[in-house]
Amino acid sequence: MLNDAPVLSITDGTVPIAGRPVLRHVNLTVRTGEFIALMGANGSGKSTLLRALTGLRPLSRGSVEVFGVPLPRFKEWSRVGFVPQRSSATGGVPTSVWEVVSTGRLGRRRLGRPLLPATGPRSRRPSRWSASSTVAVTA
């Protein structure tokens, strides 16, 4: 039987920063196959909402569920991808398309094993290159 629980939901969420609520009574449901865009002016709470949805910023009211599981009990983090906003991400260390796409594979490797085996039948190269060609990105 298919699980028709939302992929992600927040119900009546309130998020405080320094004791002051910056998001109040937020409701959002994202279902399988949906794509959403979170847009707003600087300082409007977009990053705060994403942090609350991933448990990086606590709610003072309301609840978050991931794949139908309350956030405090959710354990399958390998099913979730999140790239935090960093203003310094473009400076300092050069990064290739291959490296960015490969970071999505970090949660799927065994502890103590290299990110991508160089050769052999278990090599992740096909999935990495398939992912970058799917989004029309080239190295």
Image (cartoon, grey):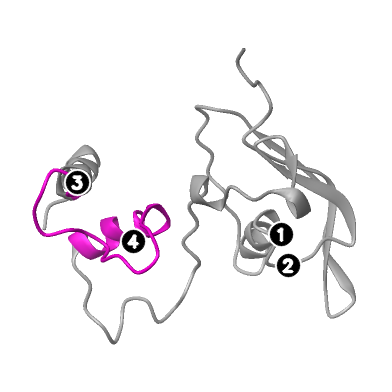
Question: Which is more foreground, mark 4 or mark 2?
Answer: 4
* 11 horizontally vs 121: left or right: right
The image quadrant where one finds the C terminus is: bottom left
> Element type at marker 2?
loop
- Of circles 1 and 4, the one toward us is 4
User: What is the CA distance from the residue labelled 1 to the residue labelled 4?
Assistant: 22 Å
Residue 116 covered by magenta stretch:
yes
Comes first in the chain, label 4 or label 2: 2
Label 4 secondary element: helix
Q: Which of pointers 1 and 3 lies earlier in the amino acid sequence?
A: 1
The residue indicated by pointer 3 is 122
Whether label 1 touches label 3, CB < 8 Å: no
| Residue 34 placement (x, y as % from top left) | 53, 30
Determine whether the residue tagged by mark 1 lies in a helix, strand or loop. helix
Question: Label 2: which residue?
Answer: 57
Q: Which residues are magenta?
A: 98-124
Q: What amino acid type is highlighted by mark number 4? A: Thr
Q: Which residue is mark 1?
A: 52
Residue 49, position as x, y percentages in the image: 68, 58
- Give the x, y percent position of residue 126: 15, 43
Residue for badge 4: 103
Closest to the camera, between mark 1 and mark 3, is 3
Tell me, yes or no, if residue 25 can be seen here: no
Toward which corner of the image does residue 111 lie, by quadrant? bottom left
Nearer the observer: mark 3 or 4; the answer is 3
**Mark 3 surroundings: few (<14), some (14-19) or many (≥20) residues within 10 A:** few
Relative vertical location of residue 80 with respect to residue 4 in this rendering, above or below:
below
